Amino acid sequence: MSTTKRSRVPAYLDFLQGFTGLFLALFIVGHILFEASILFGPDAMERMTLFFEGYYLFGERHPVIVTILAAIIFALFVVHAALAVRKIPSTWRQYRTFRNHMKRFGHEDTSLWMVQVVTGFAMFFLAPVHIYTMMVNPSKIGPYLSAQRVVEGWMWPLYLVLLFCVVLHAFIGLYRLALKWGWFEGKDYRKSRKAMKYILRTSIVLYIAIGLASLSSYASIGLDIKNGSIKVER
């Protein structure tokens, strides 16, 4: 009988990956809703900006708060990515084996994991650009300056691709965490899994729609600024 004690490090790393993923996914859920304040007009977005800059708490704007929050998100993003890369096929043989397995069994949850790998890989290059912009230009997150960045700064292609990536990655991640830890399992796991998949699909469609509507609003304002219809201090 073997008395070799197995290391608990992989389990701890797996837990940390899940914890950071959960935090980041919930952040994305809130962040997209925050950005959606533009749908109620520039004034609504400006009020949200003042809130995150601590104006209602300190009586004056402190953009450094945005820098600190962005730095925390970036640190968690790096940790999560470093932990997640452990499970991604690192050689062509490993990838081919996994691809054949996925095709043979046609398991939807396995396919969802592959979507997470692809979107995570894309986010590795796209997300740092956005986060870095927030870190170094925290005073430029208002409705008009953000709109200028979208149009005149040609950030809309990046934001468009990033929107699809973060929504898919975040909600699939939440779904897989719920399955892994048995959240909302109930008495009939088949019924609960079916319900969770419905919520997954609905949430993805809803949040992509909200994100697209918000990006369109920023683009519209940005075009008005560019054409001179709206005057903004540059």
Image (spheres, rainbow, N blue to C red):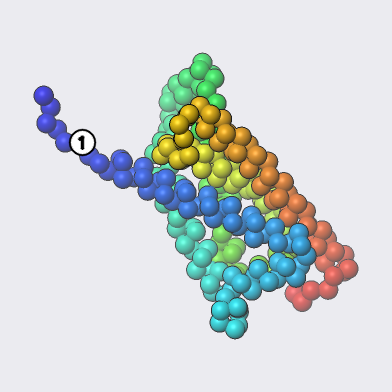
Decide if residue 74 is on the left or right side of residue 34. left
Q: Which residue is mark 1?
A: 6
Residue at x 70% of width, y 61% of height: 37
Alpha-carbon neighbours of circle 1 within 10 Å: few (<14), some, or many (≥20)? few
Image position of 135 with respect to 168: above or below: below
Q: Position of residue 165 (x, y in %)?
A: 60, 43
| Looking at the image, residue 152 lies above or below residue 233 | above
Q: Is residue 10 above or below residue 66?
A: above
Q: Is residue 144 visible?
A: no
Q: Position of residue 128 (x, y in %)?
A: 55, 55
Q: For the view shown, which residue lies furthest in the top direction?
A: 104
Q: Residue 206 is drawn in which quadrant?
A: top right
Q: Quick one: 57 or 67, which is closer to the camera?
A: 57
Which of 92/21 is in front? 21
Q: Residue at x 51, y 43 (%)?
A: 174
Judge by depth and name the residue closer to the eye, 39 or 103: 39
